[in-house]
Amino acid sequence: MSEKYKCLVTMSNGKKRTKTIRLDRIKKRIENNIFALFGKDNVKRIEVLLWNENTNKFYKSLTYDTKLENHLRKYCQIENKKGYEDYSNYGSRTNGRFQRFYLGKSTGCIPCYLAVYKSNSPGGFAFMENCYKKNSLIEVAK
């Protein structure tokens, strides 16, 4: 029996659809299966429900978003929500309020967006949408 993933799809017209896809049926990436079903132009956003064994809860992993696709491989800035301030070396100059990074995307069968802090870095952290203020992502000059 193959694992199943529940996908929450927001269409361009605002309607929401759900689709369950088996792991053995995924063609390279899960978003390709969704695009084949609904058409890429009709899909605005794809979220996949994933099980977290530490919290015993499902969480939503953002796999595709038309707004974020436009910012891929570009240097961006985002404003953190209160309580999610970044006090690492990357956010120390703004007291954790803002973060700057290159927006990337992982290469797995269920991809997620990545915050890559250096242009020559081999990877980055998962871009957790719930940690940032809505509509605060902007491109900045380096």
Image (cartoon, grey):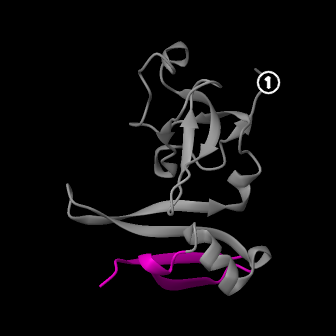
What residue is rendered at 55% in x and 37% in y? 115
- Across and down, in percent, residue 98 comes to 57, 28
Magenta span: 1-26
- Across and down, in percent, residue 104 comes to 62, 42
- Quarter of the image where the C terminus is located: top right
Residue 128 belongs to the span the image colors magenta: no
From the viewer's perspective, tell me whether residue 102 is left or right of residue 129: right
Question: Helix, strand or loop at disc 1?
Answer: loop
Q: Decide: is 129 above or below 74.
A: below
What residue is rendered at 52% in x and 84% in y? 18
Q: Residues within 10 Å of mark 1 (few under 14, many from 20)?
A: few
Quadrant of res 136: top right
> Mark 1 is on which residue type?
Ala
What residue is rendered at 61% in x and 30% in y? 101
From the viewer's perspective, tell me whether residue 41 is left or right of residue 89: right
Q: Which residue is mark 1?
A: 141
What residue is rendered at 75% in x and 74% in y? 40
